[in-house]
Image (cartoon, rainbow, N blue to C red):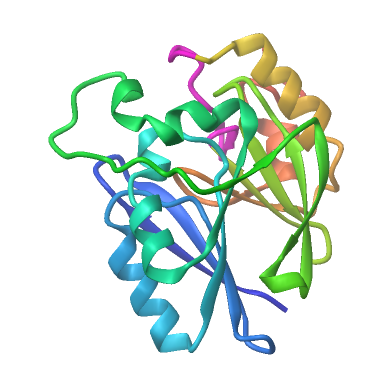
Amino acid sequence: MFNVLTFECGPVATNCYLVGDDVSGLAFLVDTPKDSLRCVTEALTERGWNLSDILLTHTHWDHTADCRELQSTTGARVVVHEADVYRLTDPMAHTIWPLPFTIPAVQTFETIKGLSGMLTILAGTATMAWVHTPGHTEGGICFLDTTNELAYVGDTLFAGSIGRTDLPGGNMEELCQSIKQQLFCLADTYAIFPGHGPTSTIGAERLMNPFVGLHAT
């Protein structure tokens, strides 16, 4: 059973999720917002975990600002969809608005390609399903723990909302289609862990979400 630790970090309150396995002593991290380096490394030390994987749901700066530092500190591999690589390798050119800090580029990573698949994590001791969910960004990904029915959905789906589509790479029709086809096929009991705000469930969002739920207008 994985242990999920949630940290809300950075100037726009971005969630990241440190997920550890006490048996193997290994952990993976979903997204790397600014100021996550300290809380993540402290938690790793406290729990006695080693970080093996950094899984990026997408590459907007608020989800990747500490990626290079965390990679350098822990030696973890970074996984990203190929369509979102360009923001990771040249982040300051794609911040949309000026930032009062510099985000270092990440040059070493593994890419995911296609629409869905299985990813080996935790040094080969576990697997994680993934689905491509474009619409918020071109290479948005949701990571699915099918054993424990947990979905790490980034900025694709929120509790009572969906990701922005008014930024470069966004597309409202595509995002709604991604949610309905790739996430709403999951069981109602799946918990969703979004990039901002509180957790929810697939069932709650399928029923009540004002953008993509059953009663959406």
- For the question of whether residue 216 can be seen, the reply is no
- Please give the name of the residue rendered at 37% of the width and 29% of the height, measured from the top-left corner: 90
- For the question of whether residue 5 can be seen, the reply is yes
Instruction: Describe residue 189's horizontal placement relative to residue 157 as left or right.
Output: right
Vertical side of 128 occupied by 105: above or below: above
Q: Main secondary structure of the magenta part?
A: loop
Question: Which sits in the foreground, 131 or 83?
Answer: 83
Vertical side of 170 occupied by 40: above or below: below
Q: Is residue 42 magenta?
A: no
Q: Quadrant of the N terminus?
A: bottom right
- Where residue 134 appears, as percent x and y from the top left, is 65, 24
How many numbered marks have been drawn onto this rendered protein structure?
0
Give residue 83's quadrant in the image. Answer: top right
Residue placed farthest to the front in the image? 107
Give the residues in magenta. Answer: 155-168
Q: Is residue 161 magenta?
A: yes
Question: Which sits in the foreground, 82 or 21?
Answer: 82
- Please give the name of the residue rendered at 52% of the width and 64% of the height, measured from the top-left corner: 76
Q: Quadrant of the C terminus?
A: top right
Instruction: Describe residue 134's horizontal placement relative to residue 66 as left or right.
Output: right
- Where residue 174 appears, as percent x and y from the top left, is 68, 14
- Where residue 153 appears, as percent x and y from the top left, is 62, 43
Instruction: Describe residue 103's horizontal placement relative to residue 90 as left or right.
Output: left
Residue placed farthest to the left in the image? 100
- Where residue 191 appears, as percent x and y from the top left, is 69, 54
- Please give the name of the residue rendered at 82% of the width and 38% of the height, measured from the top-left corner: 116
Question: Which sits in the foreground, 128 or 125?
Answer: 125
Question: Which sits in the foreground, 65 or 151?
Answer: 65
- Please give the name of the residue rendered at 82% of the width and 58% of the height, measured from the top-left corner: 146
